[in-house]
Image (cartoon, coloured by chain):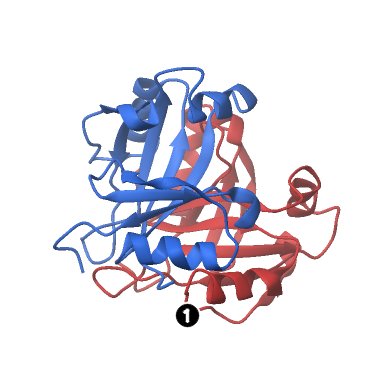
Chain colours: A red, B blue
Amino acid sequence: MKLGRMNHIGVATPDLDASIAFYRDVMGATDITEPFVLESQQVRVCFVNTPTDSGINGTQVELLQPTSPDSAVGKWLEKNPLGGQHHLCFEVPDIHAAKSEFEALGKRVLGEPRVGAHGTMIFFVHPKDMGGILTEIMESPKGAH
Amino acid sequence: MKLGRMNHIGVATPDLDASIAFYRDVMGATDITEPFVLESQQVRVCFVNTPTDSGINGTQVELLQPTSPDSAVGKWLEKNPLGGQHHLCFEVPDIHAAKSEFEALGKRVLGEPRVGAHGTMIFFVHPKDMGGILTEIMESPKGAH
């Protein structure tokens, strides 16, 4: 695989609005996107944009609140009721090539590529095959370099 | 606090050399720093540099292998033997100002500021006060913007 940008870290929270207030009031974030529901993942989600030295495209914090206790994030929160670091997301230029490469290495890709929170195709790879980290692979948005 | 750059995510591993091979051979990283021992944290550590759209200063993956089972990372690995996401590090312009601000908000700062893996002063904040995330605050290296 060709490693791309670290697009975001996924942070699960039992209370999205409280987490937004935390990033704004405690951490000093000034650019937080409007929350929306991503039905395919059963989450309400928003992104905290972080500063960079270049001024463009910092690694985001993706805040995730489950819309159902039976969702993947809902089950994760049962074991981690405070919330915390849920996954890590890297960009790739070609989602299908990346899937084939992971599978050729014996890594368990969790389901077929589907549309993620940034509107491009994503898949997840099993944490037990990835050094304990649930890893999201995301096709770079069109126009990105 | 004034939120700075997401400097790195800290990833604990039981085998640093295997993790370096994983980031190189599976994830496709091409820029991984030489490991060194950070005595103050009882870890052997290196950084995986990730690409950015601007070409400068991507959020790094900090790989951490404990040098003692009694260290903080050693104890964390006892509970998470595969390794995984251990902490999240943001930069600030002034480490002492940041410490005062966290303390004024009732956040538990873990110990006094000390020299971190990038050679600037750092401290950690208790995960139970930070949405379940062990958070490292790091003074930006001199010359960085």
Q: Position of residue A36 (x, y in %)?
A: 67, 77
* Tag 1 residue: A31
With respect to residue A24, does A64 lie above or below? above
Classify mark 1: residues with Cα within 10 Å, few (<14), some (14-19) or many (20+): few
Q: Please tell me how many numbered marks the rendered image carries.
A: 1
Figure quadrant of residue B10: top left
With respect to residue A96, does B84 lie above or below? above
Q: Amino acid at mark 1?
A: Asp
Residue A116 visible, this angle: no
Q: In this rendered view, identify the residue nearer to me: B54 or A106.
A: B54
Which quadrant, please, contains the C terminus of chain B?
bottom left
Which quadrant, please, contains the N terminus of chain B?
bottom left
Q: Position of residue A18 (x, y in %)?
A: 69, 71
Q: In this rendered view, identify the residue nearer to me: B113 or A96.
A: B113
Residue B142 appears left or right of A99: left
Figure quadrant of residue B58: bottom left
With respect to residue B96, does A110 lie above or below? above
Residue B96 appears left or right of A28: left
Given the image, what chain letter belongs to the residue carrying mark 1? Answer: A
Residue A138 visible, this angle: yes
Name the residue: 34% across, 60% down: B95
Name the residue: 48% across, 39% down: A100
Name the residue: 29% across, 34% down: B46
Outermost residue toward the left in this view = B143
Q: In this rendered view, identify the residue nearer to me: A98 or A63.
A: A63
Name the residue: 53% across, 78% down: A32
Q: Position of residue A66 (x, y in %)?
A: 76, 61
Q: Secondary structure at mark 1?
A: loop
